[in-house]
Image: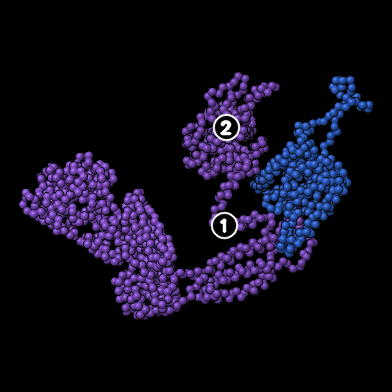
Amino acid sequence: MTVLGGIGFTAPWLLAALLALPVLWLILRAVPPAPIRRRFPGVALLLGLTDDESVSDRTPWWLLLLRMLTVAAIIIGLAGPVLNPQRDQSSGSGPLLMVLDGSWAGASGWPRQMEAIEAQLTRAGRAGRPVGFMVLTAPEAPLFQAADVWRSRLPGLEPAPWQPTEGNLARAQAAIADAGRFDTMWFADGLDYDGRDAMLASLRSHGTVEAFQTGANTLAIATARYEDGAVMLTLRRAAAGLEREVTVEAQGRDPAGNARVLATAQTTFEADATEAETALSLPSELRARITSFDIAGQRSAGATTLVDDALRRREVALIGGRSDREGLQLLAPLHYIEQALAPTADLIDGSIAEVLPANPDVIVLADIATLAPAEAEPLQEWIDKGGMLIRFAGPRIAASDVSRIEEDPLMPVRLRAGGRSVGGAMSWGEPKSLAPFRDSSPFYGLTIPDDVSVSAQVVAQPDPTLAQRVIASLSDGTPLVTRKKVGQGQIVLFHVTATAEWSSLPLSGLFVEMMERLATSSAAASPDAEALDGTTWTPVRVMDGFGTLSDAGTMPGIDGARLLDAPTGAEVPPGIYASGDRRIARNVIGPETELTPAGWPADITVHGLSVAPEQPIAGWLLGLAILLLAADAAASLALSGRLLKTSSTTVASALLVLSLTLAPENLGAQTEAETEALSAAAEVSLAHVLTGNREVDDVAAAGLRGLSDTLFFRTSVEPALPSGVDLETDELAFYPILYWPITPDQPRPSDAAYVKLNDYLRSGGLILFDTRDADIARFGTASANGRKLQELAAPLDIPPLEPVPTDHVLTRTFYLLQDFPGRHASRDIWVEAAPPDAEKVEGMPFRNLNDGVTPVVIGGNDWASAWAVSENGAPLLPIGRGFSGDRQRELALRFGVNLIMHVLTGNYKSDQVHVPALLDRLGQ
Amino acid sequence: MTGTPAQEETARLALRARAESEASRLPPLLARAEYLAGAVLLGAHGRRRAGLGDDFWQYRPAQTGDSRRAIDHRRSAMGDHEFVREREWQIAQSVMLWVDQGASMRFASTADLPEKADRARLLSLALAILLIRGGERVGLTGTELPPRRGNPQILRLTEMLSRDSEADYAPPEHRAMIPNARAVFVSDFMGDLGQVREALTKAADRGVRGALLHVLDPSEEAFPFAGRTVFESMGGTLRHETLKANDLRDRYIDRLAARKHELQQLCTLTGWRYGLHHTDKPAQTGLLWLYGALDRAA
């Protein structure tokens, strides 16, 4: 590619054609414009006139310039100009290794990074350099291939949700150890990590290293904490800088289950600070719905922090027995449980019937033996749906018959009568201590303090199922805590009291830990590794580098002890981990993770990512040439007089065409509809309904034209040309009358069209229905057209009808008529019925009939055929025979005139009956 | 008509078809002309149709010299004086029309405007209808259609007026002019003025007076042309090429003005009236002028 003045040309030799332009100038200048041949009668006056100048009009210089520009644009366009040609900044040779950090920190700028890589791949491809790829977060031995091969694989690259680990770097260094010489382009994400310097040194031992790094600052959000009733969010940035405001969005699901932003919080990085904090105080209901917090506008795993049980405060309902010893707080049955749970759970008090509607996670019953059926049944349902019932024994349970002979549904085991007490004054033996927890127990891994002892308990009845249900036992093997799963929930029974009466368990820290393990409380803000010892956690949902969650599928579980310690990487990807009911989130940024900007040695070139891509501009130039040609055509026409001054419409339309080619079209339909409406509204115009049957529509149009002509000649109504209306699309309000010929196969109008028709009828319009079959049928279902008419007219708002009475106003609006023939001469014409109380007054020729215009006239005389005229005004269709036929056509036209007069003047002629009375009243 | 009977039959059918297609042109022109004429009757003059054609009379006292038979006894019996019923002396005028049918008349500068020939025919037919309703006799100059009265003459006029002439510029027909009649010439007068002069002087010799209606297209007045142009007459017999049409404009307009002036002079000399009508103006104005011109020329 040759570069001239910042523009590259793929075919620079074509530019030599520009030298021909001056020659073209001379040729074009010499040739006058071609003459126009014009017919003009006045030529007789021109004969003998000579031109003043013997030289013809030369093509003006500006037109020549226009044409030169056109030719130049074509030549340059064909020479293949390219804007921003990539000049080789460092033209190297030999293999090239592209190293990507590929971590979450680059996710926000990932598309730009891909563009930069693609641009470099294009360059390398042009230079013929083999290219290898290495992503440090998932290193493989680099394979040097043609650049085009890599280009097709670029879209498959994705950032990993972690930083390159030391293991990764070690593998990467091993992979390139014996790769020979190559140059390196390192696309870095801008964050420092351990082992990066070693990696750089290793790369530099093979050749030169160039670095490409975005200038954007990396933002991250640390794991959210719950403190003092609010969610604390800590934001970090890699490099301190100017003051910057950041929005944090709490993502979650609304009650309808749709993912949405539940709350937002603003925070500001102070100038020169790398950390910002904000507190988000939310109702617990809302807080429980939050799944993650995002930094708005940042799309990376580091800018997303997942939320686990740590933020979730469980609701625990505490229900104690009757406390008859008021005031002795330490002896209250629920005191120790309250103390254990209050810091981490929301507690509810009340009766069972009161707390169940709140759907608590846990209900604790302290020494309550029997429940009323009205309480027991909903309680059982609640457990079936996943509730956890924790019961504590006590004197009442020991004294009752609950679960004695048969296992109570709300008890995990059967109990022996009376219970036992050990180590007391009246018994043998020492108080018993706890046996170590078995590995199937939820308490496995908890250390048992030495001072916990049990002196009294209720005893489980030996049963085949007992062994599975024991989750804690005394040193002599007696069950201490038993558990039964019911449906999705479970029932746990502590065989001792919740007070310190029967054992010292409630006084110990073990009690709190046991309650935690039972998931009665939320986990502490940071569960320590010891608490997780011996548990296995399986990933449920994992994040990718962009911070998007996806199902973990069949990823292997992780030992609880390692879950919190191990750095995030391929083994421990960030995401949500579950063990039993508990969930823990591993986030990219922990509470202590610091972000350090990556630094480069001074002798390494660091490029930004911004790439001005090569842009071929040949298309633009050729387009410009076409526009210039169009301008040239217009100018030539104007110059030679072909573009007349009077034909400014031509210019306008040419401009319109031009603008339509350049601008989106949307103009035509609108203006067409408007002009049609305008012309229909400007003058009286008859209309017929388009049936879709071409023949019928043509006859209807011709008929209305004939009627319009008749009106024009005989009356003061001078209608414009009739129009056909499409009921679905056209506005009806402009037409005083609609002629609706019925064909058996016409489509039924839509409901919207019927609404329009009914509006039309109510606002004074008239529809003339014509079944056109009066020669063979009368109304009713006897003919196909009649059936169709009934079907079409059923949704219309039509008043009661009657055959035209002899004194109807239609008989005398213009002509005096008694028959209304068309092409057929049936007398069955129906109009709106007269009111039943219309009486003929003595001495009056007509009844005093209703006001207004009948909304419909229904007949079958095929009037349009009788009215129809050809373009010449001659009748279109034969009517009858001889003179009687002409007479029938005349009567049909008279009916048409009467009808239009009726539509336009209403009952004016009917009111004429009052003339004698009016004259009388005037005193004449 | 030499040929087999079948050929003759075909020829007759073809003639019939042509005749019908010709006839089909009549009603629109006739209808338009009647419509135009109807507007004049109702509007400008206010003459009632019922009065037309009836005798007009008045009574005046009998004077010496009046014939005894002239005395109207019915009127005289009402009083002591004798009255004579006097009829107004009415003679129907003959009006001869000449409408230029030449090719130059079939010109319209834009599609919106009617051809000059169309306007000329419309005006003359409407005038003919008016005159015939007024009881005059109307015909064409020349021998083809002498003046007659009655509605059938309108149909005949319509037919004759619809005939196109092949000539580029048709000379006025001045043969067989009836002495002391009146005449109307409608043309664009683009052809040889000598012929017009001859026709008018001949008419003046015979005592024929009338009106000259000069029908022009607006582009013939304005000459809105520019650039290198070859002008051709409508029939293609005349040709004029110019390199700069816009330079010719002033001289063309001067020549046209001179021609108009000459026509006016001619009219003044012969006692005719000269009128100018443009096809972009309503036909009504032309008809009013024509009617008025004939009225006053009487």
**Up-down relation of residue A763 to residue A666 (above or below):** above
Q: Quadrant of residue A400?
A: top left
Tell me residue A295's x, y (percent): 39, 60
Viewer-closest of A840 and A437: A437
Image quadrant where one finds the C terminus of chain B? top right
Expressed as whole percent of the image width and height from the top left, the position of residue A673 reads 57, 47
Q: Amino acid at mark 1?
A: Leu
Label 1: state its secondary structure. helix
A589 or A727, which is in the foreground?
Answer: A589
Tag 2: amino acid: Val
Left or right of B30: which side holds A854?
A: left
Question: Chain B shown in which color?
Answer: blue
Q: Secondary structure at mark 2?
A: loop
In this rendered view, identify the residue nearer to me: A390 or B297: A390
Say which quarter of the image contains residue A708. top right
Residue at 81 percent across and 42 percent down: it is: B294
Identify the residue at the far right of this view: B64
Chain containing the residue with disc 1: A
The chain to which mark 2 is attached is: A
User: Which residue is under mark 2?
Assistant: A853
Residue A330 placed where, x, y %? 19, 49
Q: Is residue A384 visible?
A: no
Chain represented in purple: A
Q: Which numbered disc covers residue A660? A: 1
